[in-house]
Amino acid sequence: MLVPSEKNSPAMQRILALLANMSDMSASDISREAFVGITTLACGGYLKALRTRRLVHVSGWRKTCKGFVTPLFSLGDRPDLARPEFKDEDRDSAGMNLIVGALERIGMMTYREAAHATGLSLNTIKNTRYMDILVKQKRIHIAAWRRNRAGPLIAVYAAGYGKSAEKPAPLSRAEKCRRCREKKRALSDNRGIAAQLSKIQGISAAR
């Protein structure tokens, strides 16, 4: 997309006029105050072009409600302020608060159960590492470990700070075989019981 020159673009001129009077403006601030679409500023490359032409620079960073940081822009040819180091301990978001609130209200849960309780998607919780970060922040802890049907262990979380439970050692080959035999035996017993009940019901119906 070809970005117009600030000399013949009303939108560009409004951006520069705004930054001449106000500094440390985020893209959303500029969009609102200069009446320029946020997609035009970011995806359309207007802000990038103004920085390339040395008309504006990154003068600061602001923490967002989702726990990340967004650049702030000011007028002038100055070096961009480096993005601050962002540690897990600094993260915060509405989703993280929802998880903590659900654990306080309902009790211990796995991350899958937390997703169901909060309405957050499994991918959101996994990709943003919410559970790991909340443990680092000592807002939750691993209270126990649960082995799912496939065998792997899954952490069970509780609200508040506490010493996280140690992860048990993985099952040995012999233990896996034993669990498999027990599962097959249980299925066989269930089929036997079902067959007996069916036979009894057949006899009763015949009478």
Image (cartoon, rainbow, N blue to C red):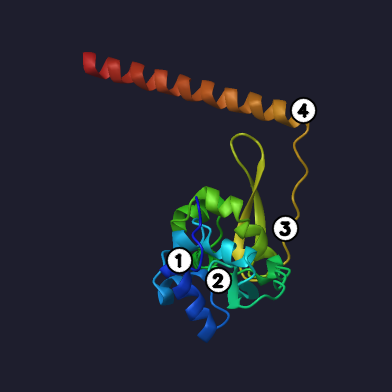
- What residue sits right under mark 3 in the picture? 165
Q: Quadrant of the C terminus?
A: top left
Inspect the image, locate mark 3, and give the three-letter code of the amino acid beneath it.
Ala
- What residue sits right under mark 2 in the picture? 64
Inspect the image, locate mark 1, and give the three-letter code of the amino acid beneath it.
Asn
Pinpoint residue 72: horizontal percent, then vertical percent. 59, 74
Residues under numbered marks 1 and 3 in contact, where contact means CB atoms less than 8 Å apart: no
Inspect the image, locate mark 2, and give the three-letter code of the amino acid beneath it.
Thr
- Asked whether 119 or 81 is in front, the reply is 81
Q: From this view, report whether residue 55 is shown above or below residue 172.
A: below
Pinpoint residue 34: horizontal percent, then vertical percent. 42, 74
Q: Looking at this rendering, what residue extends furthest in the front direction? A: 7
- Asked whether 133 or 110 is in front, the reply is 133
Q: CA distance from mark 4 to mark 1?
A: 76 Å
- 1 sits left or right of 181 in the view: left
Inspect the image, locate mark 4, and give the three-letter code of the amino acid beneath it.
Ala
Select label 1 or label 3 by which is in front. Answer: 1
- What residue sits right under mark 1 in the picture? 8
Q: Earlier in the sequence, mark 1 or mark 3?
A: 1
Q: CA distance from mark 2 to mark 3?
A: 33 Å
Q: CA distance from mark 4 to mark 2?
A: 51 Å
Q: Looking at this rendering, what residue extends furthest in the bottom direction? A: 21
Q: Quadrant of residue 131?
A: bottom right
Q: Residue at x 48, y 80 (%)?
A: 18
- 161 sits left or right of 23 in the view: right
Select label 1 or label 2 by which is in front. Answer: 1
Residues under numbered marks 4 and 1 in contact, where contact means CB atoms less than 8 Å apart: no
- What SS does tag 3 mark? loop
Q: Residue at x 28, y 16 (%)?
A: 202
